[in-house]
Image (spheres, rainbow, N blue to C red):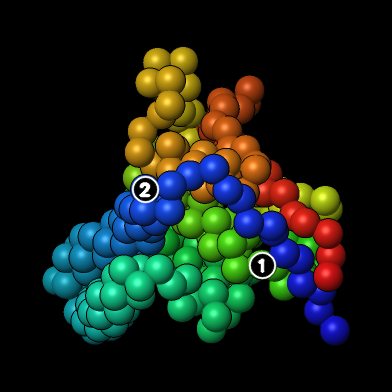
């Protein structure tokens, strides 16, 4: 039997303001990466159309399906629902699928390999933790693809008393010192999602080059 962890409800925010903020974050973290991935796919299909027409047509069919899914996701987000892919695949497989699809959209002249490193027999988590983890990872991977120029990105997911997430790339490195104190909307959203659960999310340069995004999401007692 799989273990399930729950996170207690957190108070302290007016309900309407909290719901609106969550909706804004979900729109940014959910639809944003999906649309960004669609744009990458369209660019790849454009480059392939003259030499690999069949492959380009197949990619366009996949993108069409993803955009229809984004429309459905938007409707569910408005209703404050969790991403359906988590119910279909679970957190780990959903992350793997997103990583595979995203890496396949990167231009061939600058390929990106994304590895997902996770322990076997990963337990079922609460809805709140799964949604926060999935959104944080997707946003981090999208940033790597769009801004880092990395050739390798590793996603590490570990579970002890907390859910620990690391997204490490070997790209040009984030301009941590020159960035605004709270970062852009993506980083603010990742920090907010972690903070809502009493956790933390930080970004830092890696000494050997590249960027590390690390999040820790606390879990309540096992039930």
In the picture, measured across the screen, residue 162 lies left or right of residue 40, that is right
Note whether residue 163 is visible.
yes
In the picture, measured across the screen, residue 2 lies left or right of residue 107, that is right
> To which residue does mark 1 refer?
126
Answer few, some or many: residues within 10 Å of disc 1's Cα (few below 14, many 20 plus, some between 14 and 19): some
Residue 93 placement: quadrant: bottom right
Whether tag 2 and tag 1 are in contact, CB under 8 A, the answer is no
Taking the spot 53% from the left edge, 83% from the top edge, the residue there is: 88
Badge 2 element: helix
Taking the spot 44% from the left edge, 38% from the top edge, the residue there is: 187
Residue 131 in the image, given as x and y percentages of width and height:
54, 63
In the picture, measured across the screen, residue 52 lies left or right of residue 79, that is left
Q: Nearer the viewer, residue 212 or 151?
A: 212
> To which residue does mark 2 refer?
17
Q: Which of 22 and 91 is in front in this view?
A: 22
Quadrant location of the C terminus in the rendered image = bottom right
Name above or below for residue 52 compared with residue 136.
below
Taking the spot 58% from the left edge, 48% from the top edge, the residue there is: 11
Note whether residue 169 is visible.
no
Q: Which of 62 and 124 is in front in this view?
A: 124
Residue 175 in the image, given as x and y percentages of width and height:
43, 22
Badge 1 element: loop
Answer few, some or many: residues within 10 Å of disc 2's Cα (few below 14, many 20 plus, some between 14 and 19): few
In the picture as drawn, the residue positioned furthest to the top comes out as 177
Front label number (2 vs 1)? 2
């Amino acid at each position: 039997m799989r273990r399930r962890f729950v996170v207690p409800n957190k108070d302290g925010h007016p309900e309407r303001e909290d719901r609106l903020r969550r909706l804004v974050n979900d729109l940014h973290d959910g639809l944003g990466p999906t649309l960004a991935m669609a744009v990458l796919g369209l660019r790849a299909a454009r480059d392939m159309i003259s030499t690999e027409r069949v492959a380009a047509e197949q990619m366009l069919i996949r993108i069409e399906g993803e955009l229809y899914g984004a429309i459905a996701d938007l409707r569910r987000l408005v209703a404050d629902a969790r991403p359906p892919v988590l119910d279909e695949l679970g957190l780990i497989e959903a992350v793997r699928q997103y990583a595979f699809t995203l890496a396949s959209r990167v231009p061939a002249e600058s390929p990106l390999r994304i590895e997902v490193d996770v322990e076997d027999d990963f337990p079922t988590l609460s809805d709140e933790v799964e949604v926060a983890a999935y959104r944080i990872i997707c946003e981090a991977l999208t940033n790597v693809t769009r801004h880092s120029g990395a050739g390798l990105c590793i996603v590490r997911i570990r579970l002890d008393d907390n859910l620990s997430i690391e997204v490490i790339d070997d790209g040009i490195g984030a301009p941590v010192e020159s960035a605004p104190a709270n970062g852009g909307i993506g980083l603010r959203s990742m920090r907010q999602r972690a903070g809502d659960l009493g956790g933390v999310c930080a970004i830092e340069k890696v000494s050997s080059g590249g960027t590390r995004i690390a999040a820790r999401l606390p879990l309540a007692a096992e039930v």
